[in-house]
Image: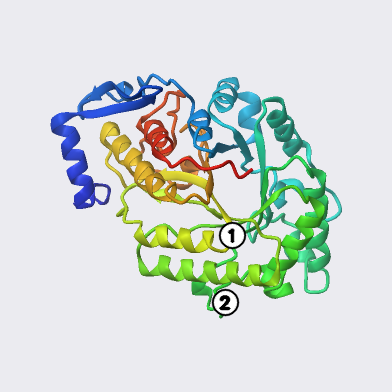
Amino acid sequence: MPKNLLLTRRQVIWLSLGTFTGLAVLLKGKDGYRNIKILALDEPSRSFSVIKKEESLKERAAAKGIIYGAAAQDADLRLKPKLAAHFVQECGLLVPEWSLKWEPLRPSPDRFDFTAADWMAEFAQAHSLLLRGHTLVWHLSLPPWFKDTVNRQNAEKFLVEHIEKVAGHYAGKMHSWDVVNEAIHVDDGHPDGLRKTPWLEFLGPDYIDLAYRVAARADPKALLVYNEFGVEYDEPKYDKKRAAILKLLESLKSKGTPLHALGIQAHLSGSANSDYKKLRNFLSDVASLGLQIMITELDVLDEDLPSDIAARDRLVAKAYEDFLSVVLEEPAVSTVITWGLSDAYTYHIKTHRRADGMSVRPLPLDADFKPKLAWNAIARAFDSAPRRRSLK
């Protein structure tokens, strides 16, 4: 059987129900759920975009004390007015997808270029969007000069200078910062599960604590987040990753590190088994440390799903709703961010191409900015989420 047709039994049953009965698209209004349309499996894909929206995703999320936002690149927002308009309509928070990473910010060792990131900050302010910083410390997206310039003798100087300069530049304007990104990689063999990065090599494990302390001094008002991927599914490799992350969080909290939240990226697979019992327990363990939890880069990989767009959209929507229905049960989950808003502007186009050559469809809006079943799934998850107080 072709790889893109390997579905779980549960997914096959879910699709079969759609084949014979259609799928009821429900939206929740002030008087409860109402049936908008019954969508049969063999309807043209454009039918799935005919969705009447009573409220935006940000409004539905805010009604439950949750923040909804998305990532975008400055060039896309500047040059595509339609994207910008839908972004303002749907989102309460903006994440610069690229312009706050080391490579674009630091064209040379002694120069910072805030041009693109400043445009994003001004866009957010003009449209009353919260602004989120991504990312201060990462082992990727480093500028070309980094390898031949940074060493054991000067690494701390570069790290501290970068955080002070960048976090200080946006002090008071940031909702939150991914201070350290993806510092865990159990397979690297470090006793603490830490990833072998230049920062670990030059500064040792204490570089993580140092980064948070410098960030807290530079911007005392921002939520400081540890951001990580690979914690979602109930498989041994995810068990190890969750255990290592929890150990790191416990260690940082015991030191008094100014860490406020865990970011879970949640790059989901549309073909994965959605049993999230262990994830739910992990969320409770994180919350018990007094940390908020943010879903920071949510999307659904569809490269292994069927070519049929109607069937594929249903499976993508199901992945969204299965995941969010579990994680939003945890009151510490304060924020949900999709890594993009429209299928026309997603990194999946380059990094997760489909073998059949068809366009990827991982996000809430399609390439024409029409809401898909994924939008409905996210909306229903917000509608069904327990109400919580707004944490920030």
Q: Are marks 1 and 2 in contact (CB under 8 Å)?
A: no
| Amino acid residing under circle 1 | Gly
Q: Is residue 268 left or right of residue 100?
A: left
The residue indicated by pointer 2 is 192
Q: Is residue 363 left or right of residue 65?
A: left
Q: CA distance from mark 1 to mark 2?
A: 22 Å
Q: Is residue 347 left or right of residue 40?
A: right
Category of crowding for the residue at label 2, using alpha-carbon neighbours closer than 10 angstroms: few (below 14), some (14–19), many (at least 20): some
Task: Residue 295: tell me if it is visible.
Answer: no
Image mark count: 2
What residue is drawn where x is 70% and y is 29%? 123
The residue indicated by pointer 1 is 290
What residue is drawn where x is 47% and y is 58%? 283
Image position, residue 379 (x, y; %):
41, 33
For the C terminus, the image quarter is top right
Q: Secondary structure at mark 1?
A: loop
| Residue farthest along the left direction in this orientation | 20
Category of crowding for the residue at label 1, using alpha-carbon neighbours closer than 10 angstroms: few (below 14), some (14–19), many (at least 20): few
Q: Quadrant of residue 170?
A: top right
Image position, residue 168 (x, y; %):
82, 48
Residue 55's tag is none
Q: Quadrant of residue 277?
A: bottom left
Q: Earlier in the sequence, mark 1 or mark 2?
A: 2
| Amino acid residing under circle 2 | Asp
Depicted 356 relative to depicted 286: above or below: above
Image position, residue 260 (x, y; %):
64, 56
Image position, residue 153 (x, y; %):
83, 73
Q: Nearer the viewer, mark 1 or mark 2?
A: 1
